Image (cartoon, grey):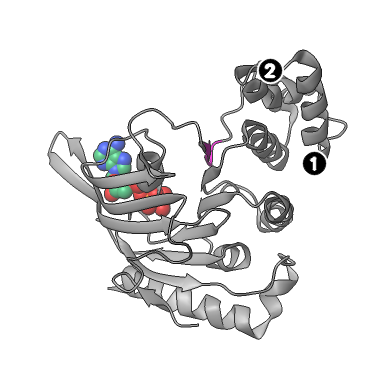
Amino acid sequence: MPATTKSASASGPVSAEPKLSLRGVGLSYRTGKGRVAALDGVDLDLAAGEFVALVGPSGCGKSTLLKVVAGLLPATTGTITLDGAAVSENVPPGIGLVFQSDALLPWRTVEDNIRLPLVIKGLSAGRQREQVRELVELVGLGSFEHYYPGRLSGGMRKRVGIARALAYDPDVYLMDEPFGPLDAQMRIRLGGEFLSIWETLGKSVVFVTHDVEEAVAMADRVVVMSRRPGTVKAEFPISLDRPRDFREVRFEPEFQRLQRAVWDSLADEIDS
Ligand SMILES: Nc1ncnc2c1ncn2[C@@H]1O[C@H](COP(=O)(O)OP(=O)(O)OP(=O)(O)O)[C@@H](O)[C@H]1O
């Protein structure tokens, strides 16, 4: 399937009423030397249950975009709506963030880190215990629940971060290079585990990654951003079957064709 251009996709890719919608979103940072335009005129829709991967050259504004969507930075121009309501400052309740740094509380054990969103939600102690047990098993940390983060490997800390995001149970996950610092084998393992979990949950995801292969293997749609100030340059629907085998899918000809197309679009931004 060919990539859609920014203008061709402006009416929304999947559903008439997107879960999340960005129109003309721009952001410039104020610095000592004036303003730095990080984003310009970003139009993007995310359908309920859709998995969108965002790729783009370094510094094009991918992290900035997630922060604006999360309400952590106010957009300089444009509008963002979640379920039709404008997103303003403060993280909206339907949005969950998973950043590259795992941001675990070092003085709390694995289970207490995972428990945190459940405490904030006001669940009873019994329900908290039950859900923490389920989540610890789901992310494969069965015998580590009493460990402190300092005693875990990078991959295990990522698992705790994912379990904590699952405990929060948002409608939309914003993920910024969640497997960034891990080695290639661990990325494939954790990526595959996360993909299987997502396929059973059916939540909406915006997933920022530098890894085109990872983007194509996971997403329903890959969005390529232009150089800074970042905007949506092209969109590639990924119609590979679900559930997907995160490792094996890479050997399918259609996968390789899509990967090539995304790379070609990205290369123009990096080379020129
Ligand atoms: N707080 C800030 N003040 C000023 N400029 C900033 C600030 N944060 C980011 N920038 C600039 O805005 C641009 C976009 O940054 P951002 O981190 O969003 O890009 P990115 O695409 O996520 O980069 P990378 O892929 O390298 O992580 C960059 O040029 C960056 O230098």
Give the residues in magenta: 96-101
Q: Residue at x 37, y 61 (%)?
A: 57
The image shows residue 105, relative to residue 235, as above or below, that is: above
Q: Which residue is mark 2?
A: 108
State the image coordinates of residue 155 (x, y, percent, origin top left).
70, 43
Query: Which residue is at the front of the view, 193 or 183?
Result: 193
| Element under disc 1 | helix
| Left or right: where 70 falls relative to 61 | right
Pick whichever, 27 or 79, lies toward us. 79
Looking at the rendering, which quadrant does residue 160 occupy? top right
Location of residue 192 by image quarter = bottom right
Residue 266 % position (x, y):
40, 71
C-alpha distance separating marks 1 and 2: 20 Å
Looking at this view, is 85 or 215 the one in front? 85
Residue 99 in sight in this render: yes
Disc 1 designates what residue? Answer: 138
**Is the residue marked by circle 2 packed among few (<14), some (14-19), or many (20+) residues within 10 Å?**
some
Residue 61 shows up from this direction: no
Numbered disc total = 2
Q: Is residue 146 magenta?
A: no
Amino acid, disc 1: Leu
Q: Does mark 1's beta carbon lie closer than 8 Å to ligand 1?
A: no
